[in-house]
Amino acid sequence: MDMTIPTEQVRFSVAPMMERTDRHCRYLHRLMSRHARLYTEMVVVQALHYARDTDRWLAFDPSEHPVAFQVGGADPTMLASAAKKIAAAGFDEINLNVGCPSDRVSSGRFGACLMAEPALVADCVAAMAAEVRIPITVKTRIGLDDDRTDDRLEAVVAAARAAGCHVFVVHARNAVLKGLSPKENREIPPLRYDRVYRLKNAYPDLTIVINGGITTLDGARCHLAHVDGVMLGRAAYERPFETVGHVDHLLFGEPFEPSETAIATRYLDYAAREIAKGARPNAILKHAVNLFRDRPGARQWRQAVSGPGATLATIDHLRHLLDRAVTLETLAA
Ligand SMILES: Cc1cc2nc3c(=O)[nH]c(=O)nc-3n(C[C@H](O)[C@H](O)[C@H](O)COP(=O)(O)O)c2cc1C
């Protein structure tokens, strides 16, 4: 079975983010880029195992491809059976979380604390790979706590590679398991991009994606001189149009196509369809809060999409705001 992913398909991805990269958010990102690789939020394997209705995690729109499912867990048997469900649902990749530092996750003995157990990481990868024909990949950190050596990352990568993993996403910071919150763990441990570049040099056969603190596509382009791909998390969510909206043009050499208003119009059509099927309006609209920045009408847009109690009438109001924004832009031109 081929566990590689064409480099073209990993050049740019949007990071898995809990409470953010649900299927509505991914739909919005896909409207902005045909090429970005999209990830689900981390789903804990037990949830897939025990929940009666797994559709809330496994359902997605066909336009989302290529789309990867991120799973959290450390029980090879459970992961193997989850992998079958994920592959049957049509996802393009299964990514094992070896980077989440939250207490809750560490007490379940998975996430970043798995960096201390390379043999178990290998067992998890091998168990999933034995069941499915889609690539199993790993997202990890460069080390644990105050360890400055290369040893842990080296051990995790070597073990997972031997088990068949060929694609690694590396958040270029250590994970501090005690004393820092998940948010602090994304800000305080220093970024060491050179460590990720060295990993690529040591394993030229592996596909290495760098993550952490990348805020612009110019920055992304610099990293691409050293590694195969870049993954953006917060910048993609907080400034979606300036990042994801420009990816096809700046990183894939395609003519620049989208405008915020065109994307917003298509997203409102999607929202109306989803609401008609029973989705909560706020669950969809909240992802569009950052779409317009510094544009005429941006403040009214933000207020309208983030207000509580949105309904189908809110969609009409937003459509009206868009029409007005287009008129203002035309007048200003
Ligand atoms: C709100 C939020 C939720 C996150 N949830 C996940 C997650 O479910 N799985 C994961 O591997 N990383 C998660 N992360 C970490 C990101 O994937 C990424 O590694 C981190 O934010 C660093 O990248 P950035 O500087 O581009 O944001 C999350 C980050 C944020 C901000």
Image (cartoon, rainbow, N blue to C red):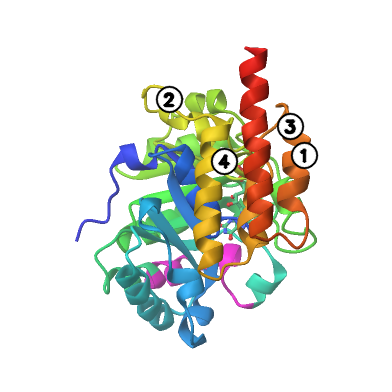
The answer to which quarter of the image holds residue 307 is bottom right
Q: How would you rate the neighbour count of disc 2 (Cα within 10 Å): few for under 14, some for 14-19, many for 20 or more?
A: some
Quarter of the image for the N terminus: give it. bottom left
The dot on residue 31 is none
Are the residues at dot 2 and dot 4 in contact (C-beta closer than 8 Å)? no
Magenta part mainly helix, strand or loop? helix
The dot on residue 264 is 4
Is 118 magenta? The answer is yes
Q: Which residues are magenta?
A: 108-124
Marked residue nearer the N-terminal end (1 or 2): 2
What is the C-alpha distance between the residues marked 3 and 1? 5 Å
Q: Is mark 2 within 8 Å of ligand 1?
A: no
Are the residues at dot 2 and dot 3 in contact (C-beta closer than 8 Å)? no
What is the C-alpha distance between the residues marked 2 and 4? 19 Å
- Of residues 329 and 163, which is closer to you in this image? 329
The residue where tag 3 is placed is: 297
Residue 291 x/y as whole percent: 63, 38
The residue where tag 1 is placed is: 300
Q: Is residue 90 above or below residue 251?
A: below
Q: Could you say whether the residue bearing mark 4 is in a helix, strand or loop? A: helix
Q: How would you rate the neighbour count of disc 4 (Cα within 10 Å): few for under 14, some for 14-19, many for 20 or more?
A: many
